[in-house]
Image: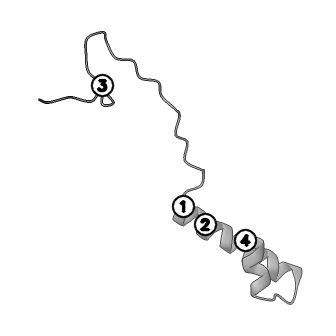
């Protein structure tokens, strides 16, 4: 994505292109954070005799 942004600006030198890439990366980090979010999966167990959110309650 950063390289694409640099190419869109049509830089005259490699140094200008590198400057645009660094600016684009800095902007991405400022907006989205420096790392991808990490959401570990969790396994939930219910005690015997309790109802989970998946259990359907039947009413008569």
Q: Judge left or right: residue 35 versus residue 52.
A: right
Q: Judge left or right: residue 56 versus residue 21.
A: left
Q: Nearer the observer, disc 1 or disc 3? A: 3
Q: Quote the CA–CA distance across marks 4 and 2.
A: 9 Å
Residue lying at 52% horizontally and 66% vertically, measured from the top left: 31
Is 37 or 54 nearer to us in this picture? Answer: 54
State yes or no: discs 4 and 2 in contact (Cβ < 8 Å): yes
Q: Quote the CA–CA distance across marks 1 and 3.
A: 35 Å
Image location (x, y in percent) of residue 39: 52, 40
Mark 2 neighbour class, 10 Å CA radius: few under 14, some 14 to 19, many 20 or more:
some
State yes or no: discs 3 and 2 in contact (Cβ < 8 Å): no
> Where residue 1 is drawn, which disc sits there?
none
Is 37 or 14 nearer to us in this picture? Answer: 37
The residue pinned by badge 2 equals 28
State yes or no: discs 4 and 3 in contact (Cβ < 8 Å): no
Residue lying at 25% horizontally and 11% vertically, measured from the top left: 49
Number of numbered callouts drawn: 4
Q: Nearer the observer, disc 3 or disc 2? A: 3
Image location (x, y in percent) of residue 12: 86, 90
The residue pinned by badge 4 equals 2
Image location (x, y in percent) of residue 47: 31, 12
Query: Mark 1 or mark 3, which has the lower sequence index?
Result: 1
Query: Mark 4 or mark 2, which has the lower sequence index?
Result: 4
The residue pinned by badge 1 equals 32
Query: Mark 4 or mark 3, which has the lower sequence index?
Result: 4
Residue lying at 72% horizontally and 71% vertically, measured from the top left: 2
């Amino acid at each position: 994505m950063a390289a694409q942004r640099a190419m869109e600006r049509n830089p005259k030198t490699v140094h200008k292109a590198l400057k645009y890439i660094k600016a684009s990366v800095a902007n991405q980090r400022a907006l989205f954070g420096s790392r991808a979010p990490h959401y570990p999966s969790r396994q939930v167990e219910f005690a015997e005799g309790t109802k989970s959110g998946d259990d359907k309650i039947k009413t008569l």
